[in-house]
Image: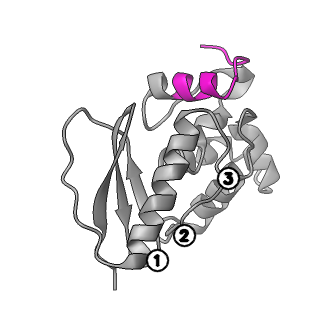
Amino acid sequence: MKSTLQACAVPTREGTFLAYYSDKGLAQLDFPTGKTPKSADLTTPELKRWHKVTTRAIEQVITGKPITELPPLDLSAGTDFQRNVWGALRKISCGKTKSYSEIAISLGKPKGARATGGACGANPIPLLIPCHRVLASGGKLGGFSGGLDWKRKLLRRENVTHYRE
């Protein structure tokens, strides 16, 4: 049985993100849209604690700093392959990048660069699972669920400049 997600706003200097929590942890993170998102009151001390950790982690990423702590992540909506890719993304250090191909090879799927890109695009928790640190072949910027402006901004804040447009 699928649990209901509780949405809670995360106001930042870059706009208001929307974090969605299941009973297992953070399940989804949406980028600011310019609209005021509907936000629920978090109903348990556990959810309040998770939200505090999420808020701090988002602030760290948008200011180009490494994340010091993550809330529990509920990645149950992903396939096994997607979860493997998302795990590989979490191993990319702040200020570093990898290519889709490098990630695919590290997962034992040397011809899986496109599938890796698809898993990055399906990442339900961008920023905290740092798909912005993944570049296309030849060091090209590639895509990003939050848009290329966000990807450029996040990479610049991590002092990454070795990509091509």
Query: Where is the N terminus found, in terms of image quarters?
Result: bottom left
Q: Nearer the N terminus, badge 2 or badge 1?
A: 1
Amino acid type shown at disc 3: Arg
Q: Which mark is residue 163?
A: none
Element assignment for label 2: loop
Q: Residue most toward the top?
A: 165
Element assignment for label 3: helix
Q: Quadrant of residue 102?
A: top right
- How would you rate the neighbour count of disc 3 (Cα within 10 Å): few for under 14, some for 14-19, many for 20 or more? some
Please report the bounds of the magenta region as a residue range: 151-165
Question: Which residue is nearer to you in this view: 147 or 158?
Answer: 158
Callout 2 touching callout 1 (CB < 8 Å): yes
- How would you rate the neighbour count of disc 2 (Cα within 10 Å): few for under 14, some for 14-19, many for 20 or more? some
Vertical placement of 45 versus 12: above or below? below
Amino acid type shown at disc 1: Lys
Q: In this view, does 163 lie to the left or right of 52?
A: right
Q: Is residue 156 magenta?
A: yes
Callout 1 touching callout 3 (CB < 8 Å): no
**Real-space Cα distance between discs 1 and 3?**
19 Å
Q: Residue 72 carries which label?
A: 2
Please name the residue shown 75% across and 43% down the image.
93
Amino acid type shown at disc 2: Pro
Q: Residue most toward the bottom?
A: 1
Q: Does the magenta stretch include residue 11?
A: no
Question: Which residue is nearer to you in this view: 148 or 57?
Answer: 57
Which residue is denoted by mark 1 in the rendering?
24
List x then y, in percent, for residue 82.
58, 59
**Real-space Cα distance between discs 3 and 2?**
13 Å
Please name the residue shown 46% across and 52% down the image.
55
List x then y, in percent, for residue 113.
68, 42
Q: Residue 90 carries which label?
A: 3
Element assignment for label 1: loop
